[in-house]
């Protein structure tokens, strides 16, 4: 992969890179399209990164469909797909990780303690392997997008990070490979995340400025759906992720909810 990227760069062409864990959907494909707008060559990777899964998480059951993914990427006109395996990425003796000090102390970092260390480390490795000029990340994983931007800044990666909007199903559910875990009933209940976000944006539009009031409403919406368990619902600063009590500028509302056994996340920037 490194030699291929060297050749592309030597030929004066630019590279856009889209890292994924596969089981691709239209959300992923929108990132490929964005990459195509930015650069001459689009490179995707598919790697289910063990370092970002905790011991009780879904590494073993994470959905996989390499043949289907490769078909979709071919149709999308992606030029190269990088498919490393665990041994190539983490050979015996591997011992270097990238850890951020502040951003992982919020939102998903609290319930997934190794997650951002795993993400930052694998993305740093992938950047050194693929050598892109641009890398595209979805704002569906907003905290991850901030973590990567911060890492690139702190470690002087010469790469421009592009953020891409959340792609949703027709009824509003944010697309996710994990939606595949939902049974038909849970698929309906999964709409509670988007409903809570919509309610929040409506409240703000109508003049509500107290985060606690908005979060209370969101909690009661989620609780009205059976078999749901809230991990967090937060209204926070769009850059630092600090909690915001009074909404006096655009804020990030982010939430994680377990629907049955499936943990789903979603978010929305709420404008005043
Ligand atoms: P994943 O395969 O879940 O690790 O996701 C790979 C990339 O796709 C990440 O940058 C995600 O943020 C992005 N992504 C996943 N779902 C969506 C979505 N519904 N809309 C936009 N981007 C997404």
Image (spheres, rainbow, N blue to C red):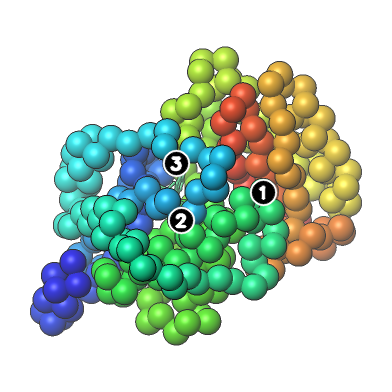
| Residue lying furthest front | 93
The quadrant holding residue 257 is top right
- Residue at mark 3: C-beta within 8 A of ligand 1: no
> Could one spot residue 107 in this view of the protein?
no
Measured from the top left, where is residue 233 in percent x and y?
74, 45
**At x 27% / y 70%, what residue is drawn?**
129
Question: Mark 1 or mark 3: which comes first in sequence?
Answer: 3
Question: Mark 2 or mark 1: which comes first in sequence?
Answer: 2
Viewer-nearest of discs 2 and 1 = 2
Rendered image: mark on residue 53: none
Whether pointer 2 and pointer 1 mark residues with C-beta atoms closer than 8 Å, the reply is no
Question: Mark 3 or mark 2: which comes first in sequence?
Answer: 2
Question: In the image shown, does 253 or 47 lie closer to the viewer?
Answer: 47
| Residue receiving disc 3 | 59
The quadrant holding residue 236 is bottom right
| Secondary structure of residue under mark 3 | loop
Q: Is residue 100 above or below residue 17?
A: below
- Residue at mark 2: C-beta within 8 A of ligand 1: no
| Residue receiving disc 2 | 51
**At x 19% / y 72%, what residue is drawn?**
2
Q: Residues within 10 Å of mark 2 (few under 14, many from 20)?
A: some
The Cα atoms of the two marked residues, 3 and 2, are separated by 10 Å
Rendered image: mark on residue 111: 1
| Secondary structure of residue under mark 1 | helix
120 on left or right of 89: right
The Cα atoms of the two marked residues, 2 and 1, are separated by 15 Å
- Residue at mark 1: C-beta within 8 A of ligand 1: no
> Could one spot residue 147 in this view of the protein?
yes
């Amino acid at each position: 992969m490194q030699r291929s990227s060297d050749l592309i760069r030597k030929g004066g062409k630019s590279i856009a890179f889209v890292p994924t864990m596969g089981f691709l959907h239209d959300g992923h494909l929108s990132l490929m399209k964005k990459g195509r707008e930015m650069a001459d060559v689009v490179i995707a990777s598919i790697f289910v990164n063990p370092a970002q899964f905790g011991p009780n998480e879904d590494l073993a059951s994470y959905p996989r469909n390499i043949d289907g993914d490769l078909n979709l990427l071919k149709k999308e006109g992606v030029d190269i797909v990088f498919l490393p395996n665990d041994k190539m990425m983490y050979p015996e003796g591997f011992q270097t990780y990238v850890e951020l000090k502040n951003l992982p102390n919020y939102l998903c970092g609290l319930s997934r303690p190794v997650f951002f260390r795993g993400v930052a480390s694998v993305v740093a490795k992938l950047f050194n392997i693929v050598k892109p000029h641009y890398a595209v990340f979805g704002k569906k994983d907003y905290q991850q997008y901030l973590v990567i931007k911060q890492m690139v800044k702190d470690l002087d990666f010469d790469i421009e990070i592009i953020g891409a909007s959340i792609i949703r199903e027709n009824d509003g559910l944010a697309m996710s490979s994990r939606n595949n875990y939902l049974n038909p009933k849970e698929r309906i209940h999964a709409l509670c995340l988007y409903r809570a976000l919509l309610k929040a944006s409506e409240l703000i539009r109508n003049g509500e400025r107290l985060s606690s009031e908005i979060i209370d409403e969101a909690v009661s919406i989620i609780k009205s759906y059976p078999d749901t368990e809230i991990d967090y619902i937060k209204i926070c600063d769009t850059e630092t992720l600090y909690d915001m009590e009074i909404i006096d500028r655009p804020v990030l509302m982010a939430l994680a909810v377990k629907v049955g056994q499936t943990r789903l996340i979603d978010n929305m920037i709420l404008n005043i």
